[in-house]
């Protein structure tokens, strides 16, 4: 018999397992096709928006003294995700390229939905895994990212983003007034370059060239080529095309999330290229209960940047006095980001209020707005 304490911990962890319901759903819609394909975005973006409205905010914080062994039910969902995603992506490539009831449009629509699964959930889980210290979890992170052809995200996130967030050296900190449609192509280009440069610099400090076998980019490229080869083996050229569709959608979902997490927020420049330490105020916080279940507390992003080594069940919520708050959860905010005039109407006044609250001494924000290093003050 399972001890009562274990049952209680399992019960508390179960809401974070709701994402597993996407796997049987995507198999059902693959067999039916047609308008049923809309169930995939509906079950993530729209369902969890409605649940957020119904369930409200989760303001309670977990006990930071919780032991690692007490988090096993939370960790398990991130550990089992990769094999399920792998089988789903490549199983559907084999199926969809042979299914006579699916038109070309329906095949693309199906893999748009697969990209929602691999981006909204898969990349998010890889983010949790890459921050851990043990080899298994970091390997799973690499494998998940290979399935969306975005392996360099690990290097960029750990070596660049967390170090330079809120500064001009971080490609994925969205600048004030920068619309998503300008942000997205910029980030696709700059994040790859900055990730490679960071790994190259790390090797140089050890006296090694970038071609050294320890450069993780060799692993990244090998895994990505293996995924493309498997897609071709299962579905030929069409299989590769469908695989690329889901990868693009997944990366689009990731960068939409990156866009809203730090939009317009900057760390104060102290002179000589130095900035203040990262604080909760440098990330947008969101306390919507249901979307935090779906995204394993990613919306508690202020605490994640303040304490990057905390596992997702222990991430803390912050009040308006401690961190800026998004008006809605990520599902709503990412849709708003796709309409720049709407986004600016909602978010620009909040950025200006944030500046006034935390940095009243800065009177000229022009350099920050333009992504320039301001002069020392």
Image (cartoon, rainbow, N blue to C red):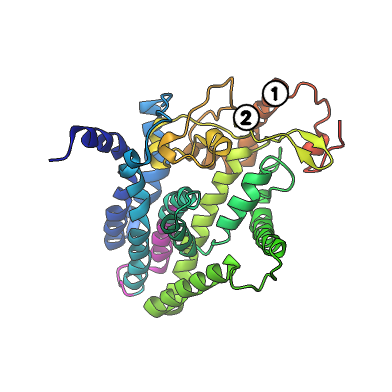
Does the segment drawn in magenta span residue 112?
A: yes
Kindly give the residue lying farthest to the left in the view shown: 1
Q: Which residues are magenta?
A: 98-116
Quadrant position of the N terminus in the picture: top left
Q: Answer yes or no: do the residues labelled 2 and 1 have beta carbons within 8 Å?
A: yes
Toward the viewer: 217 or 3? Answer: 3
Q: Is residue 45 left or right of residue 5?
A: right
Number of labels in the image equals 2
Q: Is residue 377 above or below residue 70?
A: above
Report whether residue 37 is seen: no
Q: Quadrant of residue 295?
A: top left
- In three-dimensional space, the C-alpha distance between marks 2 and 1, rounded to whole angstroms, equals 8 Å
Question: Which residue is disc 1 drawn over?
Answer: 358
Toward the viewer: 170 or 69? Answer: 69
Toward the viewer: 45 or 147? Answer: 147
Helix or strand or loop: what does disc 2 sit on? helix
Question: Which residue is disc 2 drawn over?
Answer: 281
Q: Residue 35 in the image: state x and y as whole percent.
A: 34, 54
Does the segment drawn in magenta span residue 355?
A: no
Q: Residue 196 in the image: state x and y as whole percent.
A: 66, 63
Quadrant position of the C terminus in the picture: top right
Q: Is residue 9 above or below residue 190?
A: above
């Amino acid at each position: 018999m399972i001890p009562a304490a274990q049952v209680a911990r399992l019960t508390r962890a179960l809401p974070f397992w709701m994402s597993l319901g996407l796997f049987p759903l995507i198999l059902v819609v693959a067999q039916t096709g047609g308008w049923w394909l809309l169930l995939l975005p509906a079950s993530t973006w729209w369902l969890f928006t409605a649940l957020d409205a119904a369930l409200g905010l989760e303001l309670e914080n977990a006990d930071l003294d919780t032991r690692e062994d007490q988090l096993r039910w939370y960790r398990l969902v991130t550990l089992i995700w990769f094999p399920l995603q792998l089988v789903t992506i490549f199983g559907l490539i084999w199926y969809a390229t042979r299914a006579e009831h699916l038109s070309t449009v329906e095949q693309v629509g199906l893999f748009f939905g697969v990209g929602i699964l691999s981006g909204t959930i898969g990349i998010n889980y890889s983010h949790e895994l890459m921050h851990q210290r043990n080899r298994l979890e970091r390997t799973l992170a690499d494998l998940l990212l290979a399935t969306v052809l975005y392996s360099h995200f690990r290097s960029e996130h750990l070596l660049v983003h967390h170090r330079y967030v809120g500064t001009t050296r971080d490609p994925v900190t969205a600048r004030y007034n920068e619309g998503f449609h300008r942000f997205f192509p910029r980030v696709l280009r700059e994040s790859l370059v900055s990730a490679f440069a960071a790994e190259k610099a790390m090797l140089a400090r050890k006296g090694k060239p970038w071609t050294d076998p320890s450069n993780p980019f060799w692993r990244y490229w090998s895994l990505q080529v293996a995924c493309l080869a498997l897609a071709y083996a299962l579905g030929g050229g069409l299989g590769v095309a469908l695989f690329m569709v889901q990868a693009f959608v997944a990366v689009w979902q990731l960068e939409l999330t990156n866009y809203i997490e730090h939009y317009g927020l900057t760390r104060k420049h102290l002179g000589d290229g130095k900035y203040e330490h990262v604080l909760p105020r440098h990330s947008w916080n969101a306390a919507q209960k249901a979307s935090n279940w779906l995204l394993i507390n990613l919306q508690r992003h202020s605490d994640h940047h303040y304490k990057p080594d905390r596992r997702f069940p222990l991430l803390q919520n912050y009040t308006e006095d401690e961190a800026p708050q998004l008006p809605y959860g990520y599902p709503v905010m990412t849709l708003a980001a796709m309409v720049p005039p709407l986004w600016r109407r909602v978010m620009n006044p909040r950025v200006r209020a944030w500046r006034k609250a935390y940095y009243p001494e800065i009177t000229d924000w022009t350099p920050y707005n333009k992504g320039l290093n301001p002069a020392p003050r």
